[in-house]
Structures are given as structure tokens and as C-alpha cells.
Amino acid sequence: MAQSTAETLKTTPLVERHIAAGGRMVPFGGYNLPVQYPTGIMAEHKWTREFAGLFDVSHMGPSFLTLNSPSGDAEADHAAIAAIIEPLICGDIAGLKSGQIRYTLLLNETGGALDDLMVARSPLFGGSLYIVVNAGTKDGDFARIAAAAGDKAKLTRADGDNALLALQGPEAVNVMAQIAPGAVDLGFMQYAPFDFAGQKIIVARSGYTGEDGFEILVPNANATALWDALLADDRVKPIGLGARDSLRLEAGLPLYGHDLNETISPIEAGLGFAVSKRRREAADFPGASRILAEREGGLSRVRVGLIVEGAPAREGAEILDASGTAIGVVTSGGFAPSLGKAIALGFVPPSHAANGTLLQVSVRGRSQSAQVVETPFVPHRYFRKPKAS
């Protein structure tokens, strides 16, 4: 990622809070954001796993896609808005329930990932979707979605007038109970609007750490008040980009531009679950012929998790077979504070992807032992509502 000069960097409504808290600010995705606070990445990572971490993710791309002329029939309007977005992605949006969120991928004509994103059905308005895309791809994503909408729907960006906060960790639900009590009734991958300080906030029970938690869209005018209210709870500490990355790596979650790009398909990336059953059966998504063939075993590479002995293997490090022949590449790697070991994600041929396979990685010209393991490295702890008996 090209680093912008300080003069051209965008800031979030919380920049002064980050600086006052001692945040070490760095360029990321065109924004000036905190990579860590004075306690350091390791402490921030562990705090989030044990209590609750608060992240400023206002660089992300929240938006709303809404029919221009809704009929007033909620189901018909939802079908109409789903029909606009579905030709771009591999997820079943038509089948979403009110307030339900779906993780999916924006695909090119060859089945490569242009982005991974969240698409949610409005719990209030028929014919409206809440969509959140990644920071580095948001301008292109929004242009693509707007073009598909044509004169049938309007895409409204929400990244300029709002901040996006993420509260993650086992204590997140207890903290949110003090801010928006109704949010605790949300299940994983559900969202709803709530009141805070006289304005609406949108709360989604989702996140990027593998922990239970919430992502909160709040108007800029109330962003610092919400940030302060959350940090007033002793169970919450601010967390920077460094720990956000180590947390998502332990959770085995891909980072776009690293573990996903326009050449990598959902199947290669281990994201086959995101290709919804109805869409597979209809074969009506971009790159369907390639992706369906890969589901049947036509793969040349697949994403794996690695436990690495010794120093961390960073992005770009070669993955070698037991005899030292290069067979793949690391796409994300680092130290896992929860495990006390180095871990990595990378791509290898299917013949070398079975759990327990012994491989090597090349780190600064030296070969280090590595073993293929199941991901996530650290089990997810998302909240699941009990099924009705």
C-alpha cells in the first residue's frame, strides 16, 4: 500500500482522542490512524481477548443502497434490491431476514475477489441494504455498485458523515448493555438502530477479531461522546491497528489485498461458505464456471494456516516443501500473542494442504520448520442465539 504524505491523509472524527491517548499515528488506507497506544500491541491484543477493546475503524466503507421507487410491499422491495446487488457477488441476499447480515465477496468475471464485504437487510425499510466494504477498495466498490443500481436505486455513502467504531471482546456485550441495552438481544450477524444521545446509531453484532462484539455506525457529531462513554467503562481500552491485525490473524480471517485479491477465488481462499447454496445451484454469479469447478476439486492452490518455528514469516516469504522446493507464498504472518508462537496464512498446492503436513518457510534466507494446521488458530467466540425448541 502506497504511503500518503501527512498533508494528504484523511482523519477520522476521533483523531484528537487518539493523539491525546498517546496513539502512535501512521498512514493506513489514506487515513491517519493509531497503530498502537503506549501499552503496546501485545498488551492491547491480550486485553481484547480478555475484556473489551475499542477500535476506530472509520476508514472503512459503510453505505446504504435503497430503491428509488419502493412499492411498499416489504418482501417485493427486498427482492428488487437484492436483484440489483446479487449479480456482483456470490451471496444469497434475497434470502436475508430482516436485520440479518451476510458476509460475501464482490467478484470479477473470472471469479477473483475484488473485495469481501458485509451486506445486510434493513430491519426498518423495505428495499434498503446496509453495505460495508473495505477501506482500500471502497471507491471502486461504490462505483461498481452504483453502476449496477442505475436509475433503480441510490447508493448513499456513510463514510463521510459518520464514524465507525468496533467494540470487541468477551466483555463487549456487558459494556453495550449500558450504552444501548437492546443491542444485547442481537444475534451474531444481526443489526438494528438504537438511540444514543438523541441520535440514531446503527449497531451490528459482528467484528474482525474472532471475539463477540459490535460494530457501531455513529454520526460524526456524536462520535467522540460515544467513544468517551465506552472508554469510561474500566473494561474497555483503546486498541490500534497493530493488535487488530494480530487478532484477525489468530482468528484466521483474511485481509483484502493480502490473503485475497482479484486473482484469488473464494474457494482458493477457504471461503466456500460465502458462495451461497441458491447461488451455486443457479450458477448466476461472476466466475461461476471456475468457482463451481474448484468446488469439485479443480484447484491449483489453497489457503492454509501454518504454525512456524522460530521467527515470524512475513508476507512474501516462500513456503517450501520438506525437500526445500518452493511451492507457495505467505500472505499474512506474525506472532500470535495468545499462542506464544509464530503463525502464518499462505497458499500451497492441495497436495500439501492437509493438516499436519510438514513444510518449511524461508525467513531472511534461512529455512524454518512449519506445519499446516486448521484455522482459526484461536477458536472463534461469536455469540450464537439458542435455537428455539
Image: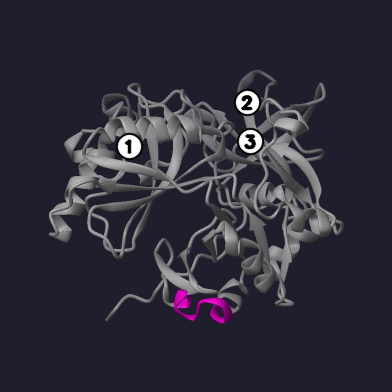
The residue carrying pointer 3 sits among few (fewer than 14), some (14 to 19) or many (20 or more) residues within 10 Å by Cα, namely some
Q: In terms of secondary structure, where does tag 3 sit?
A: loop
Q: Which residue is mark 2?
A: 329
| Mark 3–mark 1 distance (CA, rounded to whole Å) | 23 Å
Q: Are marks 2 and 1 in contact (CB under 8 Å)?
A: no
Q: Is residue 268 above or below residue 225?
A: above
What amino acid does circle 3 point to? Gly
How far across and down, in percent of the image, does residue 317 sit? 70, 26
Q: Which residue is mark 3?
A: 29
Q: In terms of secondary structure, where does tag 2 sit?
A: strand
x 72%, y 45%: residue = 33
Q: Which residue is mark 1?
A: 89
Magenta stretch: residue 181 in it?
yes
x 31%, y 30%: residue = 147
Tell me the mark number nearer the camera, choosing from 3 and 1: 3
- The magenta region covers 177-184
How far across and down, in percent of the image, does residue 85 sit? 28, 40
Which quadrant, please, contains the N terminus? top right
What amino acid does circle 1 point to? Ile
The residue carrying pointer 1 sits among few (fewer than 14), some (14 to 19) or many (20 or more) residues within 10 Å by Cα, namely many
Tell me the mark number nearer the camera, choosing from 2 and 1: 1
How far across and down, in percent of the image, does residue 113 sit? 43, 31
Magenta stretch: residue 381 in it?
no
Tell me the mark number nearer the camera, choosing from 3 and 2: 3
Dot placed on the residue nearer the N-terminal end, 3 or 1: 3
